[in-house]
Image: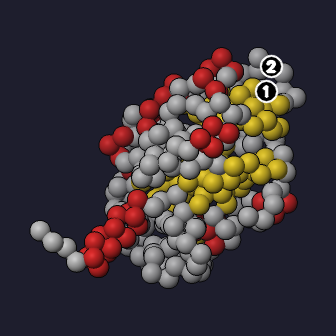
Amino acid sequence: MLFKSSTIAFVASMIAAAAAHGTVDVFSANYQDYQGADNWASAANQNSAVRQFPANTGYVGGDDIYNPSLISCGLAGQSPTPTVVTTQAGSYVNVHWKGSAGPDGTSWPHPEGAVFGYLAPCDNNDCTTFDSSNANFFKIYQDGHDMTVPNEQGWIDHMPYGTSNGNGLWGATKSMVDEGSWIVMQLPGDIPAGQYLLRVEHISYHEVNAPQHYPACIQLDLTSTTPNGSPFPALTPAGQLYNWDSEQVDIYQDGFVYDINKVGPVLYAGASNNGGTNAKRRRHHAAQH
């Protein structure tokens, strides 16, 4: 069977669009930018504290939320990288997601979603040998759907940023429009020193009752004034972060209300920020990307 070149080009473009979600291409800590990881397992990834992304930058779906190997750090992030970045407890970490949307074609493509941050202590205090399927997390950041804020449609007018009545601002939208696809979070200042996985996650809700989870993990070595041996916050195994009920989200339903506190474990009491308080913070902690 013969195909016209235009047909082949169209199909190829559709496949690329379907696969082009995003990767963490840079993050900042200690007022310094660090390279992220790509999705083709290049040698440069060994020099990054960001764990590997799947080749198709695919998501973790509802059928796999109980699979710790996948939901912990994504479809390809279970295995460690030999690089760890040192920073301080209480400092800011800023994570940039490079995607396929926006005027320049590099912004995160799914505005209808929430953003989360988690930490997990690495076994034996060594993230470079730690299998993330064994990770136990606590939540330090969340930014969901704020119905008090007018819809900021910005530059992707064809995508539904809010709900069926057009109101509300999603955390993912905020990071895209206000922050240039950066997610800005402050690490708790009262946790023990040691090596941790920082898990940064987009959950996209553009498909009814079928959220798409996009987690990424960064290996950090935290210095802290909190004495070693101090208890960790309550920890949740990776395979228990979410449940089937929390996956049932229909943003197009009349009267839709998003309860972020039903998604994942409770926000750690020592978390000093959330999505409502960090706007523009990145400009003080990392070079403009």
258 horizontally vs 199: left or right: left
The residue labelled by disc 1 is 193
At a point 58% along the width and 78% down the height, the residue shown is 103
Q: Disc 2 versus disc 1: distance between alpha carbons?
A: 6 Å
Say which quadrant the N terminus sits in: bottom left
Question: In the image, what residue type sits under mark 2?
Answer: Asn
Provide residue 150's location: percent of width, then percent of height: 60, 78
- The picture places residue 256, in percent across and down from the top left corner, at 43, 67
How dense is the environment of label 1, judged by Cα within 10 Å: few (below 14), some, or many (20 and up)? Answer: many
Q: Position of residue 222 (x, y in %)?
A: 78, 32
State whether residue 200 appears in this view.
Answer: no
**CB-based contact (under 8 Å), mark 2 and mark 1:** yes
Q: Nearer the viewer, residue 189 or 102?
A: 102
Q: Earlier in the sequence, mark 2 or mark 1?
A: 1
What secondary structure is found at the residue carrying circle 1?
loop
Against 15, is 91 above or below?
above
Residue at the spot of label 2: 228
Residue, x 83% and y 56% (percent of image)?
A: 285
Q: Is residue 156 above or below residue 280?
A: below
Q: Is residue 55 visible?
A: yes
- Residue at 53% in and 26% down: 131
Q: Residue at x 56, y 50 (%)?
A: 38
Q: Quadrant of residue 227?
A: top right
